[in-house]
Image (spheres, helix red, strand yellow):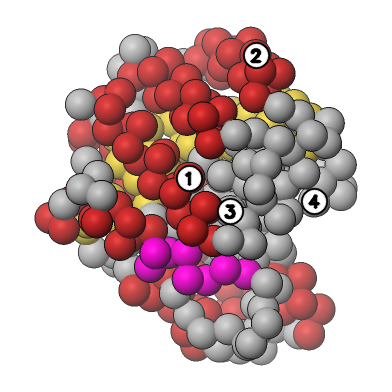
């Protein structure tokens, strides 16, 4: 299984910043140390170009990020201080998502060891998201006529408002988001299907709702699934507010992979959110996504 990774995914942040930037490097090492993937499975990333980013974002916004001229409120909403390394990181993340999507169309499955930047909108970023990887990928695949229909399955605990703001009126894209109803973002942008969950939702209720909705996603007859596999529904997650167990996350991913594989639909994975105070728990949950995928597909 080919996975995409870059050292550019990790940048320096001010002391005390709440985003766990170390998780990307830790995930890479965890996957290799456990033998889930081999070094040869990890592919290098080609950063996304400005031209391609502008398929989903306004040129004015992209220029402001590239040139460091975005105003204070724009940067504050993103949640990261501006730096040249942030620009490189953001372009690399989208580049990894593009390569993962191309590879999944060839091999049936692939993944990016970052991404799921579903809060970034046409002319702004927010929630630690600068550019929207799935929106760029969707626009690019349609433009290049590699696919006719795309479905986004977004199981991050936070609703993918940016996905819906950019792609919500695109008939070629179906967006399913299942998230914490009272969690960030507090103003939701409607998706094709939104399932808002109560705080403290546990495994059984979560998995039943997912089982009930997935067939509707496949009725759209997508040519590819873009899977935002955020692990922040985990009970231990500092920003999650749901009560899923590690086993529940495993069953979630297994359900998505088995239902996709059985229909012969390629799937491209982004890791999405994960914010446990003990970041090693988050990393274990991320690793489990890919071990589950490999077990199902291989």
Q: Is residue 245 toward the left or the right of residue 134 in the image?
A: right
Residue 274 is marked as 3
**Residue receiving disc 2:** 208
Q: Earlier in the sequence, mark 4 or mark 1?
A: 4
> SS for tag 1?
helix
Direction from residue 207 to residue 226 in the image, left or right = left
Q: Nearer the viewer, residue 215 or 38?
A: 38
Q: Residues within 10 Å of mark 3 (few under 14, many from 20)?
A: many
Query: Which range of residues does the magenta coloring cover?
Result: 19-26
Q: Residue furthest left?
A: 40
Residue at 37 percent of width and 52 percent of height: 112
Q: Earlier in the sequence, mark 2 or mark 1?
A: 2
Whole-number angstrom distance, CA of label 3 to CA of label 4: 14 Å
Q: For the residue labelled by badge 2, is the local secondary structure a helix, a strand or a loop?
A: helix
From the image, tell me which residue sits under label 4: 184
Reply above or below: 94 against 217. below
Identify the residue under disc 1: 285
User: Do the residues bearing badges 1 and 3 touch, measured as CB atoms within 8 Å?
Assistant: yes
The CA span between labels 1 and 3 is: 9 Å
């Amino acid at each position: 299984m080919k996975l995409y990774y870059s050292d550019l995914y990790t940048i320096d942040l001010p002391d005390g910043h709440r985003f766990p930037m170390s998780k990307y490097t830790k995930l890479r090492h965890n996957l290799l140390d456990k033998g889930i993937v081999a070094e040869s499975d990890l592919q290098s990333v080609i950063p996304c170009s400005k031209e391609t980013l502008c398929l989903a974002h306004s040129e004015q916004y992209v220029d402001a990020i590239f040139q460091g001229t975005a105003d204070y409120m724009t940067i504050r909403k993103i949640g990261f201080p501006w730096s040249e390394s942030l620009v490189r990181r953001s372009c690399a993340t989208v580049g990894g998502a593009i390569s993962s999507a191309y590879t999944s169309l060839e091999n049936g499955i692939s993944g990016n060891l970052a991404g799921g930047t579903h809060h970034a909108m046409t002319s702004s970023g927010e929630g630690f998201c600068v550019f929207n990887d799935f929106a760029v990928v969707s626009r690019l695949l349609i433009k290049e006529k590699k696919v006719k229909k795309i479905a986004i399955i977004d199981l991050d605990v936070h609703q993918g408002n940016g996905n819906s703001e950019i792609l919500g009126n695109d008939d070629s894209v179906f967006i399913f988001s299942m998230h914490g109803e009272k969690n960030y973002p507090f103003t939701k942008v409607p998706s094709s299907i939104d399932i808002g969950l109560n705080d403290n939702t546990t495994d059984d209720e979560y998995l039943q709702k997912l089982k009930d909705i997935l067939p509707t996603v496949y009725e759209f007859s997508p040519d590819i699934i873009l899977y935002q596999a955020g692990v922040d529904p985990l009970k231990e997650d500092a920003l999650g507010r749901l009560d899923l167990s590690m086993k529940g996350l495993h069953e979630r991913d297994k359900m998505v992979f088995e239902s996709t594989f059985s229909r012969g639909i390629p799937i491209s994975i982004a890791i999405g959110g994960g914010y446990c105070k003990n970041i090693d728990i988050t990393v274990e949950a991320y690793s489990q996504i890919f071990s589950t995928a490999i077990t199902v597909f291989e």
